[in-house]
Image (cartoon, grey):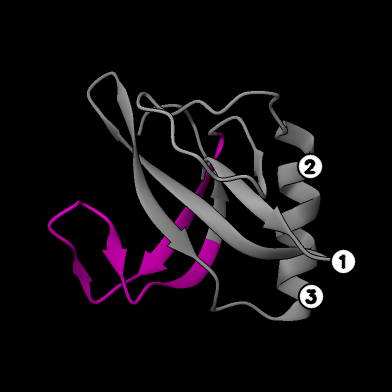
Amino acid sequence: MVGFIKDPTGVAALYLGKKEGKELRYMGKVGTGWSRTTSAKIRKALDTVVSPKQKLTKPIKKPKATWVEPRFYADIEYRDITSEGLLRASSFKSLSKGTGGR
């Protein structure tokens, strides 16, 4: 994960990235698939790695984003990848802390 949109008690959406060699490429966002409790847990985890700048190789404009160090990984279910390389019909499944090897 490369960022999130805050909501009062957790997250409204997560911005996703994917490592490709030395690049970190934007893959879209996911805004469904979690409960209020899980949303609060995600927010608590991501608040520990907030970054003043986005870490994507090619920056994107997302005015509501809170950027984070890409230390957490989201297991995302999705239907397809668009021609622009973005996830289509994505849904959050789980969160894990990365080991740096992905």
Percent x, y of residue 43 = 76, 55
Which secondary structure, mark 3? helix
Task: Give the magenta part as a residue range.
Answer: 71-94
Residue at point 67%, 50% (across, down): 64
Q: Which is more N-terminal, label 2 or label 1?
A: 1
State the quadrant of the C terminus.
top left
How many C-alpha atoms fall within 10 Å of the one at disc 3: few (<14), some, or many (≥20)? Answer: few
- Horizontally, residue 88 falls left or right of residue 48, namely left
Q: Amino acid at mark 2?
A: Asp
Q: CA distance from mark 1 to mark 3?
A: 13 Å
Q: Which is more N-terminal, label 3 or label 1?
A: 1
Q: Nearer the viewer, mark 3 or mark 2?
A: 2
Q: Nearer the viewer, mark 1 or mark 3?
A: 1
Which secondary structure, mark 2? helix
76 inside magenta stretch: yes
How many C-alpha atoms fall within 10 Å of the one at disc 1: few (<14), some, or many (≥20)? Answer: few
Name the residue carrying label 3.
37
What numbered label is drawn on residue 38? Answer: none
Q: Which is more N-terminal, label 2 or label 3?
A: 3
What numbered label is drawn on residue 8? Answer: 1
Percent x, y of residue 56 = 43, 29
Which secondary structure, mark 1? loop
- Horizontally, residue 8 falls left or right of residue 32, namely right
Give the answer, above or below, for where 6 lies relative to 30: above
Give the answer, above or below, for where 73 lies relative to 40: above
